[in-house]
Amino acid sequence: MQKKSRKKLLSARRPRRAAPGRAEGVCPESGVREKNMDLVREEFVAEMDTGLEFIEKKLSRLYKGALGFLANQVVGLLYKYLGMHEARKKGIERMDFFINSLRNFDGDVNALVDSSLDGFLHCNEAWLRRNPGHPAIPEFKRNLREEYRSQVEIYAKMMDVKGDTYGELVRMAYPKRDVLDKLLDKQFKIIDRQMQLVEREAALIRIPRMIRKEVLSLTKLGYDYTQKRIKLRLDEIYELEGQPICAGAGFGRRSGMRGESVCWRRGASSFRV
């Protein structure tokens, strides 16, 4: 009797192994994916608002105190071209399309991308402003498909893991940060290639000549800003949310992985723009 009881006790203490082909932390319950989609959307919207605020500040600083009809005309054209008055609405539409495309993901990245590529292109401002007759259009479309595929590859893995915050989803899907960093580097290289193509082929995208330089400059600034934001956000997720960090003065309090209080340095996720 004692031996049987001891075996039962040891068996109860052993952690369950994940089923073959399923990563640790993956949760197949039907409601989990919807919950995770909401967490990802909330994160996307918050980061988009920060990015739009950055572009607004850059526009105001570039032309602060600018007098004269020409300068004001440039500002007006930039706002109209960039669609700043409805940028948030369009941004949310793009996010909702992308997140909804993950709802029925069955593990086949290429199948999902091919079946929803037209919708992705329809939400892409650069594609909508393309010159259809330009000889670089096939290359342009291939790059956009690779960009979309890279996004799906990164976020699909976060759809069925357990977590109560966006940070927990990231850590459960990518326990080792270097795996995620490699996927992001791959995505950044695709976008770099796309931006170089647009700069090299002046007629590929319809941009008024008067503001072409400013549009490309602001696009590059926004892209660089986004890269920095992503790095800082991951620093926070893996280093500040994932474990308590307390040392010295100048620290604040925030909620940790399981609701406990952990310490974080004020301003750790911000930088001068």
Image (tube, helix red, strand yellow):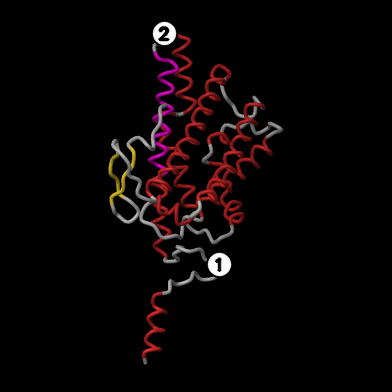
Which-is-in-front pick, marks 1 and 2?
1
The secondary element bearing badge 2 is classed as: loop
> Is mark 1 in CB contact (under 8 Å) with mark 2?
no
Is 69 contained in the magenta span?
Answer: no
Residue linked to disc 2: 67
Q: Nearer the N terminus, badge 1 or badge 2?
A: 1
Residue closer to the observer: 204 or 213: 213
Question: Which residue is most to the right?
Answer: 135
Is 46 contained in the magenta span?
Answer: yes
Residue closer to the observer: 172 or 42: 172
User: In the rendering, at what x and y percent does residue 42 appear?
Assistant: 38, 46
Prevailing secondary structure class for the magenta stretch in the rendered image: helix
Residue depicted at 54% across the width and 48% down the height: 178
Q: On the rendered structure, is 153 left or right of 158?
A: right
Residue closer to the observer: 256 or 209: 256
Question: Which residue is most to the top?
Answer: 68
The secondary element bearing badge 1 is classed as: loop
Span of residues in magenta: 44-64
User: In the rendering, at what x and y percent does residue 153 appear?
Assistant: 55, 52
Question: Label 1 sits on what residue type?
Answer: Gly
Q: Would you call the spot at circle 2 few (<14 residues within 10 Å), some (14-19), or many (20 or more)? A: few
Residue depicted at 48% across the width and 22% down the height: 78
Q: Would you call the spot at circle 1 few (<14 residues within 10 Å), some (14-19), or many (20 or more)? A: few
User: In the rendering, at what x and y percent does residue 119 appear?
Assistant: 54, 46
Q: Residue 27's image quarter?
A: bottom left
Residue linked to disc 1: 21
Look at the picture and state if 24 lies above or below 42.
Answer: below
Look at the picture and state if 79 lies above or below 167.
Answer: above
